[in-house]
Image (cartoon, grey):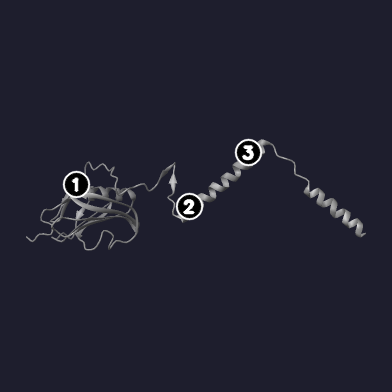
């Protein structure tokens, strides 16, 4: 009996070790494509948690750069204050204008100008998605695009012979953020900024 069981076990192992029939080239290609499809789907599902930008039709969804400006400002309205003049999309109205603070609210969000102490990144909240050094109204400035609660634009302008000027804007959408970035980049700082009347 023992000899019979050993013979059955040996026969079973021999059958198991026998190589499986090889598939056709078409079957192998289908298996490879299915495997690659699963790998891509897995990579796409974990990419956002690894900090990669989601993309659609080969282009990044969030491609706005602080150094870029592609906004068409035709039809925008001129707004002004004792601190700064700028062009804003229609519908913005001033609120809380003084010689130290200017603010406008509108459909795309809000924008504010005021004195700022500290470096370019002091006092802002959110994650900086892009930053750029530019000139605003002839003065060196640092601009941050920030994502967090909404979409913000923060600019610190180093005005010669006057306190640093902060231009801060908050938008609901990336389109609104692009508009407010454009308004800030082309702002005209008053010659009276920081000087007593």
**N-term mark: 1 or 2:** 2
Q: Which residue does the image show at 10% across and 59% down from the upper left?
A: 195
Q: Are marks 1 and 3 in contact (CB under 8 Å)?
A: no
Q: CA distance from mark 2 to mark 3?
A: 27 Å
Q: Which residue is mark 2?
A: 47
Which element type, helix, strand or loop, lies under badge 2? loop
Q: In this rendered view, identify the residue nearer to me: 18 or 110.
A: 18
Crowding at label 1, few (<14), some or many (≥20) Cα neighbours within 10 Å?
some
Based on the displayed image, in which of its 4 quarters is residue 5 positioned?
Answer: bottom right
- The residue mark sitting in front, 1 or 2, is 2
Q: Which mark is residue 29?
A: 3
Which element type, helix, strand or loop, lies under badge 1? strand
Q: Position of residue 146 (x, y in %)?
A: 32, 55
Q: CA distance from mark 1 to mark 2?
A: 42 Å
Q: Position of residue 77 (x, y in %)?
A: 19, 46
Give the farthest residue toward the left. Answer: 197
Q: Are marks 1 and 2 in contact (CB under 8 Å)?
A: no
Q: Which residue is mark 1?
A: 77
């Amino acid at each position: 009996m023992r000899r019979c069981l050993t013979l059955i076990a040996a026969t079973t192992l021999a059958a198991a070790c026998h190589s499986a029939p090889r598939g056709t080239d078409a079957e192998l290609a289908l298996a490879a494509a299915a495997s690659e499809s699963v790998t891509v789907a897995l990579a796409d599902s974990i990419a956002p948690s690894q900090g990669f930008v989601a993309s659609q039709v080969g282009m990044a969804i969030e491609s706005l750069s602080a150094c870029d400006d592609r906004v068409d400002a035709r039809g925008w309205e001129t707004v002004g204050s004792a601190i700064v003049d700028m062009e804003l999309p229609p519908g913005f109205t001033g609120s809380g204008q003084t010689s130290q603070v200017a603010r406008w609210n509108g459909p795309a969000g809000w924008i504010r100008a005021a004195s700022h102490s500290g470096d370019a990144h002091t006092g802002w909240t959110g994650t900086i998605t892009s930053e750029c050094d530019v000139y605003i109204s002839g003065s060196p400035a640092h601009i941050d695009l920030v994502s967090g609660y909404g979409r913000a634009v923060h600019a610190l302008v180093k005005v010669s012979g006057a306190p640093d000027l902060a231009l801060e804007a908050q938008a609901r959408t990336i389109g609104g953020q692009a508009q407010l970035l454009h308004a800030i980049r082309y702002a005209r700082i008053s010659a009276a900024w920081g000087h007593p009347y």
